[in-house]
Image (cartoon, helix red, strand yellow):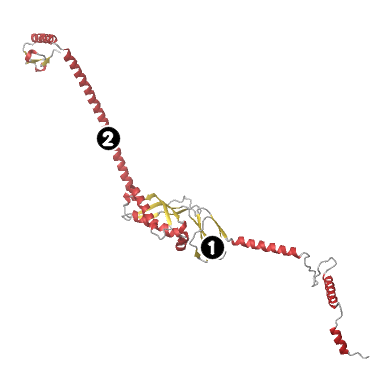
């Protein structure tokens, strides 16, 4: 019988043969296996699909791990190169700036992080600083030491003579106001706040005195300069700096003035030495006169004591005896000089007066003592 081709195709499409799907899957697996075999060599390693001798590593997981480690190391190196952190030491303060704007809160001692290329941190020293206005170059200076040096302050006295002033000023930056200070005055804040105040006050004080009086009024001038600098710095808004001390080291006068002062001092020293010598001589004379007076006083006291003793020893019999002895002496004298005259004191007491009218040089008083 002739077979209807259309009918045959219709039946075939309606009733597919059994296990066709399974066979189809098996066929696909076999094809995949054959393809894998074609990609690998005799050792089981993947073949180079391009035929250039290149082969993929057998342990793809290990390769990925190495890649991750390399990436981490690169990122770590970039992290430390960027240094997105800063360490603030004791005696310092940190000022964080974000896109040029300063954070009003200062950073205290410790470690602080920031965003690189967006933020930055400025470290400022808040320990005591020292600036020396001096002619000498032997002072250790440097920012790390906190000691700075400037030339001696060139001023003029009241008469227009040149005078140099050497000062040492100690001050400290107020850490709580450091961001505001840096924002307003910049990193060179001490050259704009402290140094001008020192120079202005020194010029003003020295200009009120003649050069000859400066050495003698050193203490007064030092006090005026110290109080003037303190007042000048405290006038700044927010008082960004605290003054610690001001020391007047030296006032250097013009050569002519120094010579004049030396001459005056030498003359004054000579006058003082002469006065001391005169005072010493007068003291010696006083001591000598006092010794003489003391000797006379002692002698007078001795004589008085002697007279007292003699007076206590006198009696009528002794007095009569002395009168008789004296009268005897007068009688003997009259025998030799008949022109002599004897004046007896009232009561017949001694001494009596002997007067020789011919020889006045022999006039004498005869005493019975």
Q: Position of residue 326 (x, y in %)?
A: 11, 10
**Element on which disc 1 rests:** strand
Name the quadrant of the N terminus: bottom right
Q: Residue 120 bears which disc, if any?
A: 1
Q: Is residue 305 visible?
A: yes
Query: For mark 2, does the 10 Å Cα neighbourhood hold few (<14), some (14 to 19), or many (20 or more) residues?
Result: few
Q: Position of residue 303 (x, y in %)?
A: 19, 19
Of 115 and 206, nearer the camera is 115
Q: Quadrant of residue 3?
A: bottom right
What residue do we see at 66% from left, 62% from top? Answer: 72
Of 181 and 157, nearer the camera is 181
What residue do we see at 39% from left, 49% from top? Answer: 250
Q: Residue 279 bears which disc, if any?
A: 2
Q: Is residue 343 visible?
A: no
Q: Does 256 sit left or right of 324 as displayed?
A: right
Query: For mark 1, does the 10 Å Cα neighbourhood hold few (<14), some (14 to 19), or many (20 or more) residues?
Result: many
């Amino acid at each position: 019988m002739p077979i209807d081709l259309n009918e045959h195709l219709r039946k075939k499409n309606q009733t597919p043969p059994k296990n066709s799907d399974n066979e189809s899957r098996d066929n696909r697996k076999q094809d995949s296996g054959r393809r894998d075999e074609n990609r690998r060599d005799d050792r089981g390693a993947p073949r180079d699909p391009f035929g250039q001798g290149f082969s993929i590593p057998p342990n793809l997981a290990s390769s990925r791990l190495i890649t991750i480690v390399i990436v981490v190391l690169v990122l770590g190196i970039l992290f430390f190169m960027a240094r997105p952190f800063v360490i603030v030491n004791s005696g310092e303060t940190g000022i964080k700036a974000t896109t040029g704007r300063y954070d009003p809160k200062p950073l205290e001692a410790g470690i602080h992080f920031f965003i690189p290329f967006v933020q930055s941190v400025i470290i400022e020293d808040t320990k005591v600083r020292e600036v020396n206005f001096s002619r000498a170059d032997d002072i250790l200076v440097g920012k790390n030491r906190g000691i700075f040096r400037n030339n001696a302050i060139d001023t003029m006295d009241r008469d227009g003579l040149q005078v140099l002033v050497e000062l040492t000023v100690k001050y400290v930056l107020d850490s709580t106001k450091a961001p505001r200070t840096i924002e307003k005055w910049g990193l060179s804040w001490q050259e704009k706040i402290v140094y001008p105040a020192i120079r202005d006050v020194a010029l003003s004080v020295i200009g009120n005195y003649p050069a000859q009086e400066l050495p003698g009024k050193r203490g007064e001038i030092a006090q005026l300069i110290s109080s003037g600098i303190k007042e000048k710095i405290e006038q700044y808004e927010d008082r960004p700096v605290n003054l610690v001390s001001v020391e007047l080291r030296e006032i250097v006068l013009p050569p002519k003035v120094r010579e004049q002062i030396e001459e005056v001092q030498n003359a004054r020293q000579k006058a003082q030495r002469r006065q001391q010598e005169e005072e010493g001589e007068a003291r010696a004379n006083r001591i000598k006169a006092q010794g003489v007076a003391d000797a006379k006083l002692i002698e007078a006291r001795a004589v008085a004591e002697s007279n007292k003793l003699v007076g206590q020893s006198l009696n009528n019999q002794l007095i009569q005896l002395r009168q008789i002895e004296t009268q005897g002496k007068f009688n003997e004298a009259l025998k030799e000089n008949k022109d002599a005259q004897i004046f007896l004191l009232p009561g017949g007491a001694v001494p009596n007066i002997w007067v020789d009218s011919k020889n006045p040089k022999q006039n004498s008083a005869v005493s019975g003592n």
